[in-house]
Image (cartoon, helix red, strand yellow):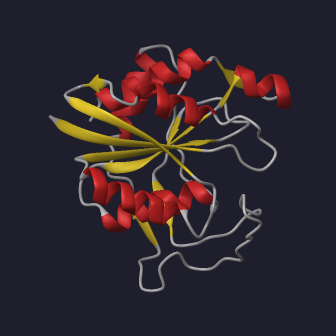
């Protein structure tokens, strides 16, 4: 059976809940579309997160990788089109704040997703779940992990941002989806592999 490495992130910044943690934990061990899902949660740390992904790749030897991140304020599930070779943004969970530094000095400026992003959006919309392709994964940890995956992995790999869960929205007053709908959306995305 093929293996899918599905990564989420721990809570970060002003967000005490990260719905990607629950998705990764919920789908861990499940079989979806002939893929055994291996769910893992990454730290929000510029010095560690990408290396954690590489360690998990080495440990599990996956056939595909989907990384998930929270895009608080978005209303749609958004598969990311591109990762750029840049770390920037607010501080991470260990207080490090990069200033536009390259992720890999010798790396290309960007990598395009190796996930079937158009098919994912179409499948989600057919299921009544709002989705669209995003042209920027930002420059924070989501972009960092997406770039690491694309730099080191030849198979299907990429990144999907998700909206806040209702549980987080109660804390932060923002657009949100039910955790069940978020979970269903990622299952449908996996079915597109």
**Image quadrant where residue 136 sits:** bottom right
Asked if residue 173 can be seen in this view, the reply is no
Above or below: residue 46 compared with residue 75: below
72 left or right of 148? right
Report how many numbered discs are placed on residues in the image. Answer: 0
Say which quadrant the N terminus sits in.
top left
Above or below: residue 53 compared with residue 11: below
Say which quadrant the C terminus sits in.
top left
Above or below: residue 104 compared with residue 30: below
Residue 132: x percent and y percent?
Answer: 51, 35
Image point (63%, 62%), residue name? 45
Q: Residue furthest left?
A: 1
Residue 131: x percent and y percent?
Answer: 52, 29
26 left or right of 74? left
Residue 42: x percent and y percent?
Answer: 53, 50
Image point (68%, 35%), residue name? 74
Image point (30%, 55%), residue name? 59
Above or below: residue 119 compared with residue 45: above
Q: Nearer the viewer, residue 116 or 190?
A: 190
Image point (58%, 70%), residue name? 47
Asked if residue 55 can be seen in this view, the reply is yes
**Image quadrant where residue 72 sits:** top right
Q: Residue furthest bottom?
A: 106
89 left or right of 29? right
Residue 105: x percent and y percent?
Answer: 48, 85
């Amino acid at each position: 059976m093929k293996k899918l490495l599905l990564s989420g992130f721990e809570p970060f910044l002003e967000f005490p809940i990260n719905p990607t943690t629950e998705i990764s934990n919920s789908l861990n061990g499940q079989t979806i579309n002939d893929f055994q899902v291996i769910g893992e949660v990454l730290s929000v740390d510029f010095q560690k997160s990408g290396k954690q992904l590489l360690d998990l790749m080495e440990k599990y030897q996956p056939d595909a990788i989907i990384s998930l991140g929270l895009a608080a304020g978005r209303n749609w599930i958004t598969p990311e089109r591109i990762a750029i070779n840049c770390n920037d943004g607010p501080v991470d969970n260990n207080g490090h704040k990069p200033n536009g530094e390259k992720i890999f000095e010798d790396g290309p400026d960007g990598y395009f997703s190796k996930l079937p992003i158009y098919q994912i959006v179409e499948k989600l919309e057919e299921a009544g779940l709002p989705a669209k392709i995003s042209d920027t994964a930002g420059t924070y940890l989501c972009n960092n992990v997406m770039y690491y995956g694309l730099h080191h992995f030849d198979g299907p790999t990429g990144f999907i941002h998700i909206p806040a869960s209702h549980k987080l929205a109660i804390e932060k007053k923002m657009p949100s989806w039910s955790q069940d709908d978020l979970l269903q959306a990622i299952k449908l995305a996996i079915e597109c592999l």
